[in-house]
Amino acid sequence: QMSLSPLKGDGVAACLSHCDRSSSYLRSSVSVPLGPSGNWLSKGVELLVCDLLLTLRTSLWQRGGSSNGEPGPAPGSQLAGFQRDLSALRRLTQCYRQAQHKVFLHETTVRLIAGASPTRTHQLLEHNLRRRTNGFRRHDGECVVGERERAHAILLACRHLPMPLLTPPGHRARLLAEAKRTLERVGDRRSVQDCQQILLRLSGGTTIAAS
């Protein structure tokens, strides 16, 4: 996850413009059907690019916070770009079923970006987290497929869903501690720092805002 703190105004707009241009190329590539011989490498690259674009769009939204530091619903054009890339990701999962966990993460994100009902977002998140918990099997401390995305979904929820939804009081801290352990294993130091900052704010009883 990249730091976008220096980007302001025109910088964010320029970055979104590059995202939209890349997204257009991606959709053209994704529309090419998989031939009889199966160009799996090409589809794998498309999946990587699509995931990177969605992650970048998420970071740009988080950096566009209001006066209290918490981002509001994204502008229509920004939301439309995210939805186009999410549609491309869903199409790619027809080739890579194991990438479904990425769809889960970004579907959670698009609800937050759109300003959808936080109660319904929380219900869907809880349902998906419970459904995926039984599928995780660790060997020698290694992360399994989808566990990183699960940790990022938890982090998103704890940063952006209203405090009363994640009750009892210790529930949010337990989720964050779980996400932090996963992110430490995969070496995502930036997200580990985000978890630590939110945990500190929880312990201090202050309001959580996007870092």
Image: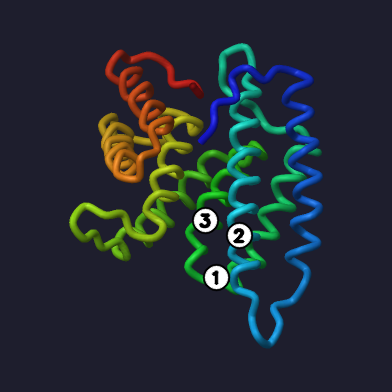
At 33% from the left and 15% from the top, the residue drawn is 205
Residue 102's disc number: 3
Which of the two discs, 3 and 1, labels the residue nearer the N terminus? 1
Residue 125 spot, x, y in % from top left? 46, 49
**Is mark 3 in CB contact (under 8 Å) with mark 2?**
yes
Q: Amino acid at mark 3?
A: Lys
At 60% from the left and 25% from the top, the residue drawn is 4
Q: In the rendered image, which residue does mark 1 sit on?
A: 96
Q: In the rendered image, which residue does mark 2 sit on?
A: 47
Q: Secondary structure at mark 1?
A: loop
208 vs 120, nearest the viewer = 208
Residue 56 in the figure: left or right of residue 131: right
Residue 78 spot, x, y in % from top left? 75, 37
Q: Quadrant of residue 86?
A: bottom right
Q: Quadrant of residue 64?
A: top right
Which of the two discs, 3 and 2, labels the residue nearer the N terminus? 2
Q: Amino acid at mark 2?
A: Leu
At 59% from the left and 19% from the top, the residue drawn is 5
Residue 199 in the figure: left or right of residue 31: left
Mark 3 neighbour class, 10 Å CA radius: few under 14, some 14 to 19, many 20 or more: many
Which of the two discs, 2 and 1, labels the residue nearer the N terminus? 2
Residue 154 spot, x, y in % from top left? 41, 42
How far apart are the two marked residues, 3 and 1, measured between alpha carbons? 11 Å
How far apart are the two marked residues, 3 and 2, measured between alpha carbons? 10 Å
Q: Secondary structure at mark 2?
A: helix
**Is mark 2 in CB contact (under 8 Å) with mark 1?**
yes
Residue 157 in the figure: left or right of residue 179: right
Q: Amino acid at mark 1?
A: Tyr
Q: Secondary structure at mark 3?
A: helix
